[in-house]
Amino acid sequence: MSSVPFQLGAVPTLSRSTVVRDEQLRQDAERLTAQWNDSWVVVVDKLGRTPVRDGGGSLALRPAAEFGSAPPADVVLLGEQDGVAYWATHGSDDAPVDLAEFGRRGWDPPAPGDGETWADLRGVGAVLDDTSAGLLTTAVALLHWHRRGQHCARCGGEVRRVFAGWATQCPNCGNEEYPRTDPAVICLVHDDAGVNGEQVLLARQPSWPAGRYSVLAGFVEAGESLEACVVREIREEVGVHVDNVRYLGSQPWPFPRSLMLGFAARASRAEELVLADGEIAEARWVSRADVQEAIEAGGRTDKIGLPGGSSIARLMVEAWAAAD
């Protein structure tokens, strides 16, 4: 049995990024206009989907010249790499919708195939290359913010985009707004047998497919530390007390604007599980052997289904399962 606390075995899927996104670049309108014709654009529809190639391995980017001779007002800068700028814009929202595929909510990636497929970040985040993963994560976050923030929070006037889409400004009162991020903790709770435990506590929300489980999560409240939020959320959702709370890593989760802060903690299996009504449909202790079996089977067996590959939850569960 390992004597070392487990750690994440890789960078979380949606934390991967290769582009430069400095503030100075966003404010250099002259440079961005000069390189516009050599730039690329990520198109995202109202469902958060974008065209991808080869079953989701890379984004199907559009040449910037298709959108005009200079950056239009409704594009946002995602970053720059090797002198090439990458932007994002809202799609026409008329791309074909496969509701059966979209309804899986990213538990599984799309099947490999030729040509282009419209897919969302949950579904393809785990199979995108590093550059594509970073671009799409940022695009979804920024474009969703702009969809919901078209009016000034101070006077209600219609705002305009500034700093290449990284802020809005109200022409009426001058108020500036910037994208917001909601911190949320996500915690893998294992039992108190040894350093890393022998079983993990997994739960299912009522809206999730039957048999699918994940680790527990919740939003940080005003005036609350991250560690205190872990203790409170676990107690509220499943009724057990945790200790030995320690940080693992983080991942943006733009649904719509969360930052998932990953932790591990211990709890006793002797405590009764008391499920939060309306929030947790099932909770159970699962052995390391059963988790390893599900991982080897691609994420699901007849005993248990694991979190989708795009989430930090999957990486946390895999890291814990490897620490035997």
Image (cartoon, rainbow, N blue to C red):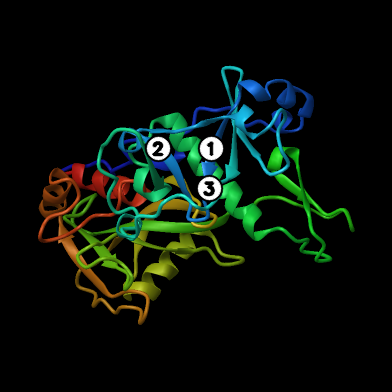
Compared with 179, 128 (above or below) is above
Q: Is residue 299 left or right of residue 153?
A: left
Query: Within 10 Å of the Cα at label 3, are there few (<14), some (14-19), or many (20+) other Cα atoms?
Result: many
Q: Whole-Å distance between the Cαs marked 3 and 2?
A: 14 Å
**Residue type beneath disc 2:** Val
Q: Is residue 19 left or right of residue 133?
A: right
Compared with 6, 255 (above or below) is below
The disc, 1 or 2, on the residue closer to the chain's N-terminal end is: 1
The image quadrant where one finds the N terminus is: top left
SS class of the residue under badge 3?
A: helix
Comparing labels 3 and 2, the label whose residue is closer to the camera:
2
Comparing labels 1 and 3, the label whose residue is closer to the camera:
1
Residue named by callout 3: 140
The location of residue 199, given as percent across then percent down, is 18, 58
Q: Whole-Å distance between the Cαs marked 1 and 2?
A: 10 Å
**Residue type beneath disc 1:** Val
Q: Residue at x 49, y 40 (%)?
A: 136
Residue named by callout 2: 52
Residue named by callout 1: 42
